[in-house]
Image (cartoon, rainbow, N blue to C red):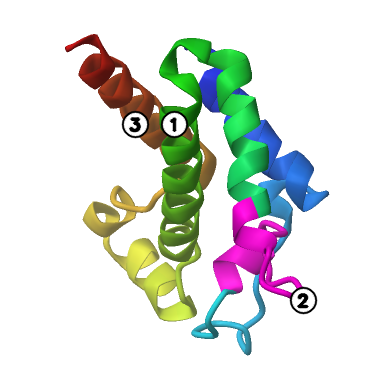
Amino acid sequence: MTRCPDVLVEGLRDHAGRGISHRRLGPGDRGRQGDAGEAFGFGPEPGGGAGVANVTALGRLVLGCVAELGEHDAGRLAAAVIMVTGAMWTHAQPSVAMLAAYQADPALASMRLDFTATLREVIEVLIAGLMARSAR
């Protein structure tokens, strides 16, 4: 389990075909539906099959590092990771005004998210919760 968050983060990077931190959305991209997903290579596919394929691929990675979760919970974890990734990406990409506020007020700057570190932590919590629940 200890390496699984790293494996999943790397899996997201591999799937996107580029490092997570390398894709920056331009000012004109903000606010469009699907921006975060597109940043990770999870954009829409013709026929709408991207979501299922992404969950399935990430679920296989989960099973490879935490087999005791089983296929059902591995799929649930994969879906949750994809949802959390999109939400977290949005918060980790502050606007110009927010960047200025961070510089002006050190107390605000302490609330800025490090995307990769926070994603790893959230994945750890999700795995721990699923493991604890399955032990009941």
Query: In this picture, is 135 found above or below 73?
Result: above
Is residue 39 covered in magenta?
Answer: yes
From the image, tell me which residue sits under label 2: 46
Q: In this view, does 112 lie to the left or right of 46?
A: left
Residue 110 placed where, x, y %?
30, 48
Dividing the picture into quadrants, the one containing residue 4 is top right
Query: In this picture, is 97 found above or below 115?
Result: below
Is residue 69 covered in magenta?
Answer: no
Q: What stretch is highlighted in magenta?
A: 35-52
Q: What is the distance, in whole Å, between disc 1 and disc 3 at their CAs?
A: 14 Å
From the image, tell me which residue sits under label 1: 72
Residue 119 placed where, x, y %?
46, 40
Mark 2 crowdedness (10 Å alpha carbons): few <14, some 14-19, many ≥20: few
Whichever of callouts 2 and 1 sits on the residue coming sooner in the sequence is: 2
Residue at x-position 64% and y-position 29%: 60
Whichever of callouts 1 and 3 sits on the residue coming sooner in the sequence is: 1
Mark 3 crowdedness (10 Å alpha carbons): few <14, some 14-19, many ≥20: some
From the image, tell me which residue sits under label 3: 126
Mark 1 is on which residue type? His
